[in-house]
Amino acid sequence: MSIVVGIRHEDKYAMERRVPIIPKHVEWLVKHHNIDVVIQTSGKRVFKDEEFIKAGAKVAKDLKRCPVIFGVKEIPVSAFEQGKTYIFFSHVIKGQKYNMPMLKKMMELKCNLIDYEKVVDEQNKRLIFFGKYAGLAGMINSLWALGLRLKYYGYESKLLKMKQALHYHSLAEAKDDISAIGRLIAENGIPHELRPFVIGFTGYGNVSQGAQEICGLLPVKEISPEKLLTLKNRKKLPDNIVYKVIFKEEHIVEPIDPSKEFDLQDYYTNPYKYKSAFEKYVQHLSILINCMYWDERYPRIITKEYLKKMYAKGRPKLNVIGDISCDLEGSVECTKPTKIEDPIYVYNPFTDKITMGYKGEGILEMAVDILPSELPRDSSNGFSDVLVNFVKPIAIADFAMPYEELDLPKAIKKALILHNGELTPPYKYIEQFL
């Protein structure tokens, strides 16, 4: 019996061009594992149908003959088929209300669901992810947006040479541009009014590392959050340095009880005992890159009320927020996820309104919610490099077996949310959201 897997076309977003498995790896699966790969035809995918055909895949209008289907983003409710195995980013593990109808349909059809986000190692570190590419694209976009915002304020900065990540042919091309800008800053300096120029990062995971990789192409000096608070008081500062600050949990929150000290594990277990401590840093930042994990149990780092107070004192130092985490009204309360085609807006804290583009009173925010799609070829390559190793074990698994007896790699079994339409033991908690 032949092993058949399908790769679906992406239809959640008009600009979603990524693919979970690239042609090079399709060729390897076909030649070395005798796997029959079927590609659902797509006119917008970054890898063309012809590239997959050359790699040995078959192109079809639908994936009806495929018992196992790989995708990237959520799948329309109408597309699921009885008893099939689906692998994609489902966005259901927080009980996301907007995806509960999708999950219910999969349960009705007794489908199997494997979520990339939960494929983790023994230390619970994610193995298959686009996060780094979200950070890379998000930082490129944030610097590009900063150039436009400074132009609005009357500064013709070196950053105007940049483009939105989408418009670069590759990550390498974008890096070349930013490296050239970095050399210009090192040679010519930063306008006096913008000094000290400080980029703040929240978080230190894959997303933050990607963003910091781009930042590292500028003439950067890293300082601690504590030193940031006294930086502007120093008499002699170099005029050609960009300062970088990384904020961890102990900088972002503090215990509500002043007699208590910050404890990371306690914060994760009892977040309601903590409040934001981030506001004292915000006024010293030129740009904030938000890369942290957040859900509604945790305090926000920037509230609408704080922005209103900050702007009431006049135009602040902070020009741009690059919210790569992109949680709707999340850790940054004014965040509204945007499309690649219209990626930036200005939030006015006095009117609580947003204006698309880079002009107007308030804070400029970049909040694209599918940032890796702006670097579709690079991000697909990195993703597929890891996923390809799990394709055959998933394809040959007998999902008719009881959950306890399923022969799957441990990392994949951890990510199995539905087994024959039933929530698996680690995900029973999702029932409360259904």
Image (cartoon, grey):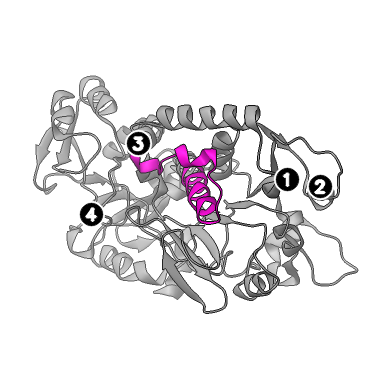
- Tags 2 and 1 touching, CB below 8 Å: yes
Residue that label 4 marks: 11
Amino acid type, callout 2: Leu
Residue at 39% across / 60% down in the picture? 338
Q: Nearer the viewer, mark 3 or mark 2?
A: 2
Q: Tell me which amino acid carries mark 1.
A: Pro
Q: Which residues are magenta?
A: 138-167
Horizontal side, residue 185 vs residue 7: left or right: right
* Callout in the foreground (4, 1): 1
Viewer-nearest residue: 208 or 53: 208
Q: Residue furthest bottom?
A: 351
The residue that disc 1 covers is 196
Residue 163 showing in the rendered view? yes
Query: Would you name the residue on which mark 2 appears?
Result: 231
Foreground of the two, 139 or 111:
139
Calculate the distance from the C-alpha at mark 2 to the C-alpha at mark 1: 8 Å
Label 4 or label 1, whichever comes before in sequence order: 4
Tell me the quadrant of the picture where the C terminus can be found: bottom left
Residue found at x 55% / y 51%: 150
Q: Secondary structure at mark 2?
A: helix
Estimate the spatial distance between the alpha carbons at disc 1 and disc 3, rounded to whole Å: 37 Å
Indicate which label's residue lies in the foreground, 1 or 3: 1
Q: CA distance from mark 3 to mark 4?
A: 16 Å
Q: Quadrant of residue 391?
A: top left
